Image (cartoon, rainbow, N blue to C red):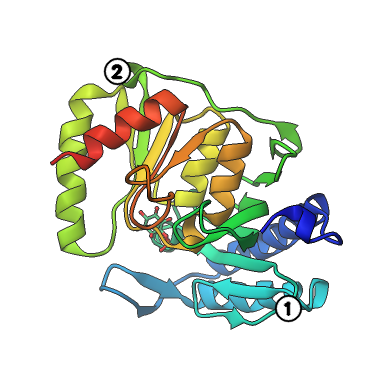
Amino acid sequence: MTLASLPDVSPGLLARIASDIARSAGELILARRGAGVSVAATKSSQNDVVTEADRESERFIVGELRAARPDDAVLGEEGAGVAGSSGITWVVDPIDGTVNYLYDLPAYTVSVAATVSDPAACADGRRAIAGAVYNPRTRELFEAWEGGGARLDGAPIRISGKAQLATALVATGFGYSSERRAEQAAAVARLLPLARDIRRIGSASYDLCLLAAGRLDAYYEVGLKPWDYAAGVLIAREAGAALIGRDAATPPGEPGLFAADPALAETLRSIVLTG
Ligand code: LIP
């Protein structure tokens, strides 16, 4: 779907809505953090935890989006599934990096993206046209809209442009199943001797934003869900990153997402996926 087919949609306005809601939800989860947090339930495995704050944040975000954009659809990690008629679907992660949130490590975010249907953009068939990622602990607000560039706290950001793996700082993440983790550990074992170093920060949306700001040189992960990457992919793309999937025919997403300077993204993929 092209923006031309949505004449009354202003990506800049959608980005403002995403930023305001991400910041407010971020302050809410920070306040809950202060009051103490515990595991409310587990999902795909005992390590895939959810807290009451995840659920409250999602309820808050959905309420704000319904008020601001009543004809839009909403998809959320904690189960929100609101239908819409406008052609816009908001993809929401109420706390991205929930394990970090549980342990009070300062690398969790609220991620909010306005997307349209586009089978070529990402593996879930959507393309973000506006998005915001807010880290309430560091109070960093990352934002972008399609064709508008990427910003951190209002200032333009660009990727590092590092093309050589040997001096690249690479971030990645691990899934919740032990089978997938075994594969991911083998990929890290191949990569570590070849890179400057590896970081496991624990929040895909924050990883993609740090890449966009040139504070990481590359990021990749296999197994991500749309809410983990929707806004971060747009912010990284608008900052100059190449976002590629596991092969030329597969857009970035759950099957594999590699983000870096174009040359480095290809190198990374070839090392991670040979095994
Ligand atoms: C997390 C991702 C992270 C990944 C974790 C988890 P969550 O999302 O942001 O990159 O490695 O396994 O999926 O579950 O905290 O929203």
Q: Quadrant of residue 225?
A: bottom left
Residue 50 location, x and y as percent? 42, 73
Q: Residue at x 18, y 24 (%)?
A: 193
The quarter of the rendering in which ligand 1 is drawn is bottom left
Give the answer, above or below, for where 178 lies relative to 173.
below
Q: Mark 1 is on which residue type?
A: Ser
Badge 1 marks a residue whose secondary structure is loop
Q: Which residue is mark 1?
A: 85
The answer to which of 274 and 102 lies nearer the viewer is 274
Q: Tag 2: residue type?
A: Ala
CB at disc 1 and ligand 1 closer than 8 Å: no
Mark 2 lies on residue: 166
Label 1–label 2 contact, CB within 8 A: no
- Look at the numbered disc 2 and give the secondary structure of its residue: helix
Please name the residue shown 47% across and 62% down the image: 124
Neighbourhood count class around disc 1 (C-alpha, 10 Å): few under 14, some 14–19, many 20 upward: few
Q: First in sequence: mark 1 or mark 2? A: 1
Task: State the image coordinates of residue 213 (x, y, percent, origin top left).
Answer: 58, 31
Q: Residues within 10 Å of mark 2 (few under 14, many from 20)?
A: some
Give the x, y percent position of residue 74.
Answer: 63, 74
The quarter of the image holding the C terminus is: top left
Residue 19, by quadrant, is bottom right
Q: Residue at x 25, y 34 (%)?
A: 270
Q: Position of residue 85 (x, y in %)?
A: 73, 78
**Cα–Cα span, label 1 and label 2:** 48 Å
Can the viewer see residue 62 in this picture?
Answer: yes
Q: Nearer the viewer, residue 104 or 77?
A: 77
Q: Residue at (62%, 54%) from the top-left corner?
A: 128
Q: Is residue 144 left or right of residue 14?
A: left
Report which quarter residue 264 is drawn in: top left
